[in-house]
Amino acid sequence: MSSKILIVDDAFFNRKILASIITKAGFEAVLACNGGEALLGARMAQPDLVLLDVMMPGKDGYEVCAALKADAELADIPVIFLSSLDEPADKIKGLAAGAADYITKPFDGGEVLARVQSQLRLRQLTRALQDLNRDLLEKQRLLDDDLSAAAGIQGALIPRADLKLPGLELSWLFVPSSAVGGDIFNAQQLDAEHIALYILDVNGHGVTAAMVAVLASQSLSPAMGLVVHPGAAGPCAASPAKVMRGLESEYPYERFERYFTMSYLVLHVPTGRLTYSTAAHPFPILGCRDGTLRTLEEGGSIVGLGLGEYEEGEARLQPGDRIFLYTDGIVEYGASVGEPFGDQLFHDVLRSSRDLPLSMVREKLRDALATFGAGLPFEDDISFLACEYHGPTD
């Protein structure tokens, strides 16, 4: 379909010449002899470009151009002014009114055609960019919906606020970043005497990282057979090292092109015996009753890369001892703009809140991060799980 050009000039001779130039070039010409006809013709014909005389009786070209630009349906139609006024001030006035170009009378047919073709190409490019932008906005909306859904699933898998486990008090902090990540943590009963604590962090951000975290959390459910296995007297808790080896086998990097770091701990509630293994994750911290902090460092490499075996460590908890699990989003907070929050500040929070309830430890950590960051957004999820051992229960 050929482009449609609206020609507006009060001189019959000028309209005929311009129409001849336009139609010979393959365009369709629509004619108007004054401002009123121009606005009516623009609304009815919806032209691709307007050639507009400046000096006309009644509404002059400046007024017509202003009216076109004020109409939402016509505002994007390019306007080229035609005028015998060739002073710079006149041209500036025309461009200020919204014109795209300016041709001085007497006009040359070649110049008119060149300027018309130039403006039509620009309009085609503008429309193509607008269409592309609409497509991108729609794709971004769909992506945002997917990320929101992934964040909702991720948030649903952290412990419930009313979670109670025998012999343990729990508290946690989870602050998702602006980009959906792959943090998951939980505390769950494995059998009558054992409780598992774990935290994992899938590399990267976005839906894939979140979905791998969801799958891993499902694998760690007692019902899936990885963390609990049959025994002669009933279900038995699997050792942390065995759990790590199972995850290594189930989540090779080639499967999702993702790997994850992790800490997995099993507490025997009657005795306080804690076994653990850490896969290149920030080491769990044992907070003793005397205020000292001990990192639990036994383990192995990243889950998914097949880099070796997993060692297993052991500790003996006394009533009042605490275990802290966390992701690197805490200690690396602020690293993109300067010094990070770091291990020292994190440990200071834990030491200084030794005599506070776990819920206040959580809030003290939240306040310390807020004070340190002074409004800096979180670039990674903030995940923190705190547990206090109360001793064996009946």
Image: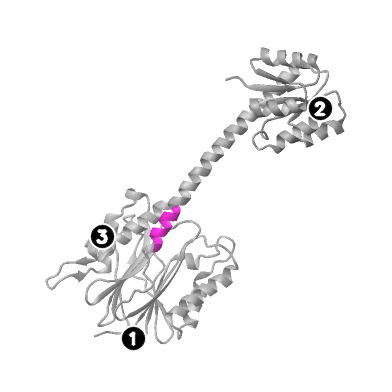
> Viewer-proximal residue, 351 or 98?
98
Q: Write down the region rendered in magenta.
A: 147-155
Relative to residue 74, is residue 183 drawn left or right?
Answer: left
Magenta span: chief secondary structure = helix
* Amino acid of disc 1: Pro
Say few, some or many: other residues with alpha carbon within 10 Å of mark 1 (under 14 / 14 to 19 / 20 or more).
some
Give me the residue at 41% from left, 67% from top. Answer: 282
Reading the image, the residue beneath label 1 is 319
In the image, residue 119 lies in the stretch drawn in magenta: no
Q: Quadrant of residue 202?
A: bottom left
Within 10 Å of disc 3 (Cα), the crowding (few <14, some 14-19, many 20+) is: some
Which picture quadrant has residue 124? top right
Judging by the rendered image, the residue that carries numbered circle 2 is 54
* Label whose residue precedes the other's in the sequence (1 or 3): 3
The CA span between labels 2 and 1 is 91 Å
Work out whether residue 94 or residue 169 is closer to the camera in this orientation and state it.
94
Q: Is residue 283 above or below residue 2?
A: below
Q: Where residue 142 sits: x, y (%)?
A: 46, 47
Magenta span includes 150: yes
Q: Position of residue 197 (x, y in %)?
A: 33, 71
Report which residue position mark 3 lands on: 246
Q: Amino acid at mark 2?
A: Val
Name the element at disc 1.
loop
Horizontal relation, residue 3 to residue 51: left or right: left
Q: Indicate the quadrant where residue 199 lies.
A: bottom left
Residue 33 is situated, as x and y percent measured from the top left of the image, at 77, 21
Report the front residue among 106 and 229.
Answer: 106
* Foreground tag (3 vs 2): 2
